[in-house]
Amino acid sequence: MPSLPRSIAHLDMDAFFASVELLRYPQLRGQAVVVGGRRATAGEGFPRLADYVGRGVITTATYEARAFGLHSGMGLMKAAQLAPEAILLSADFEAYRHYSRLFKAAVRQIAPEVEDRGIDEIYIDLGALNPDGSADAARGIARQLQQAVKDTTGLSCSVGVAPNKLLAKLCSDLDKPAGITVVTAADLPARIWPLPARRINGIGPKAAARLERLGIVRIGELAAADPAWLQTHFGERYGLWLHRAALGEDERPVVTRSEPKSLSCETTFERDLHPRTDRAELSARFTRLCGQLADDLARKGYVGRTVGLKLRFDNFHTVTRDLTLPAPIGETAAIRRAAGECLKRIPLERRIRLLGVRVSSLCRPGETAAETTPVQAELFT
């Protein structure tokens, strides 16, 4: 089998949130289950999509649910039309973060060169474990990683191994669930080029639709297109990237450590909340968001000087405001006070659909000795 000039893996957990829920409710295995919407109260049992009322969206779905056409981001009301008997579970992000830490630690025990890309996916540089670039050796390492994740968490994952990150991510999705796909440059014409162009990470729905209008549906058709023609239609930089991506070219390294620019938490309400008549609920939700953000900052070891507020009203108009403080903060109360100052600068004349809080200008605690100046504010007055 041909060798890999670079041996990079993309490990993607299979239906991660839903799979974690099935650890808690093993009796639901083999059934159509979606995760999303608000938390059910004790004693309700397992609610069905048919009984859902609201505008929540699917966070994830089991593969049995996906067979009905359900997918992440789909509105739950629309999903209920396709699979009314599917079971609806609410999200438990604390549990998902716990299992995320477990599977990443298990991988690092075998392959320490890991780039964290989110709660359920990572890139892994296998170069030190596979210096000859053997595709067979890469497949063996992938099996070892899968088994370590399974033994540690009870969950399955899929692994794609390729010469670069772009191809590795594409390949990890080809044989789900619990799949292993190893692709070399020689495999591109037979394995990659027949796939839809939208399968390339970085080609979104709008770009895919535009390509289709121009007569390009498959990755191979994109690879055969004239780069100058692509640049005419998509701009110089994106047009060139489209052509290089279709050819399987990507020089990005696996970045084992990177500093985030900001951390944020936001929530979309099940119903639009009025700043006056729903003031108590809004204030409680606001406090909860600030607490979640403070927990994230503490867990990742950051504080920040700039606090941002995001509101989306019932007419879908979105407003953001920022406040930069004299010194970095990280505690719930301090974030809430600063966000309250941002709130004073937003006219509250319509019902609120979405609320978000962000902390940026991040640094490590102790990097500055300055004290935070207290800021007093009443929320939703």
Image: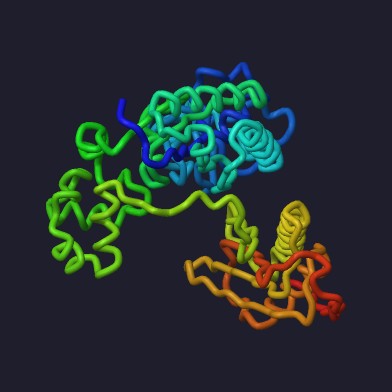
| Front in this rendered view, residue 8 or 328 | 8
Question: Residue 150 placed where, x, y %?
Answer: 60, 23
At 40% from the left and 40% from the top, the residue drawn is: 168
Question: Residue 40 placed where, x, y %?
Answer: 67, 37
Colour approach in the figure? rainbow
| Front in this rendered view, residue 165 or 232 | 165
Question: Residue 258 placed where, x, y %?
Answer: 60, 58
Q: How many marks?
A: 0
| Front in this rendered view, residue 263 or 258 | 258
> Residue 26, located in which quarter of the rendered image?
top right
Question: Is 25 placed above or below 174 here?
Answer: above
Left or right? Give the position of 133 relative to 216: right
Q: Is residue 64 visible?
A: no
Question: Is 281 placed above or below 334 here?
Answer: above
Quadrant assignment for the N terminus = top left
| Front in this rendered view, residue 137 or 34 | 137
At 68% from the left and 34% from the top, the residue drawn is: 102
At 30% from the left and 30% from the top, the residue drawn is: 2
Question: Is 222 placed above or below 319 here?
Answer: above
Question: Residue 166 placed where, x, y %?
Answer: 38, 47
> Residue 81, located in which quarter of the rendered image?
top left
Quadrant assignment for the C terminus = bottom right
The residue lying furthest to the front in this view is 132
> Residue 107, located in which quarter of the rendered image?
top right
Q: Is residue 316 visible?
A: yes
Left or right? Give the position of 278 relative to 241: right
At 69% from the left and 75% from the top, the residue drawn is: 306
